[in-house]
Amino acid sequence: MVASKTRGRLASLIAATAAVGLAYTGLQANEAESSTMDPEAVINELRGEGKAVFADFTARWCLICQVNKRVLHDPEIEKALDDAGIVFLVVDYTRKDPKISDFLNKNGRSGVPYYPMFPADSSKPPIVLPNTLTKAAVLEAIAQIKDS
């Protein structure tokens, strides 16, 4: 019985290690590539047009980000964002873009996930959601932005 539990734990550990290794390999392979997105400029432009913005700072190698996509793409969340007129902006950090790194650093972050929701009024600070998203937390932030 003990040997069976140990083998099960060992198999889980090996699978988890392999997943992290594959994610890390993907990161290394993509590190040299760079996109040209300037999240600060895009967010400022949208807010300047009177639009609230929910920024999804994500990456393909980020396991938490991939799990959170279930919440972000839930039909109720998508409808709430649309009804509130909030622009959903995906900021893909898969390739470690230096402009995205700068934005993250300016906001006290060293990586992803990062989920700031910006009111249309640029004088108001963003609501920053937790790294692990729940439907309730996202809906609450949408309601706060909608009421601001």
Image: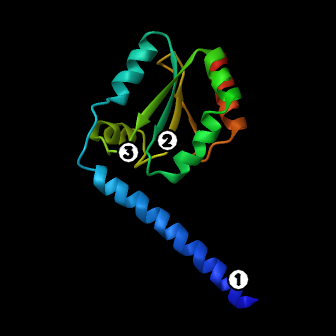
Q: Is residue 148 visible?
A: no
Judging by the rendered image, the residue that carries numbered circle 3 is 94
Q: Amino acid at mark 2?
A: Tyr
- Which quarter of the rendering shows the N terminus? bottom right
SS for callout 2: loop
Q: Which residue is mark 1?
A: 5
Closer to the chain start, of discs 3 and 2, is 3
Which is more N-terminal, label 1 or label 2? 1
Question: CB atoms at circles 2 and 1 under 8 Å apart?
Answer: no
Viewer-proximal residue among 140 and 82: 82
Residue found at x 27% / y 41%: 98
Quarter of the rendering containing residue 100: top left
Callout 3, which amino acid? Thr
Q: In the structure shown, which secondary structural element does the residue marked by tag 3 occupy?
A: loop
Q: Which of the two marks, 3 or 1, is nearer to us in this view?
A: 1
Q: Which residue is mark 2?
A: 114
Q: Are marks 3 and 1 in contact (CB under 8 Å)?
A: no
Q: Position of residue 57 (x, y in %)?
A: 46, 38
Q: Is residue 2 left or right of residue 90?
A: right
Image quadrant assignment for residue 103: top left
Q: Position of residue 53 (x, y in %)?
A: 51, 23
Q: Badge 1 local density, few (<14 within 10 Å), some, or many (20+)?
A: few
Residue 5 image position (x, y, % from top left): 70, 83
The percent coordinates of residue 131 (x first, y second) are: 56, 46
Q: For this view, does 70 lie left or right of residue 126?
A: right
User: How far is the residue under mark 3 from the one under mark 1?
Assistant: 36 Å
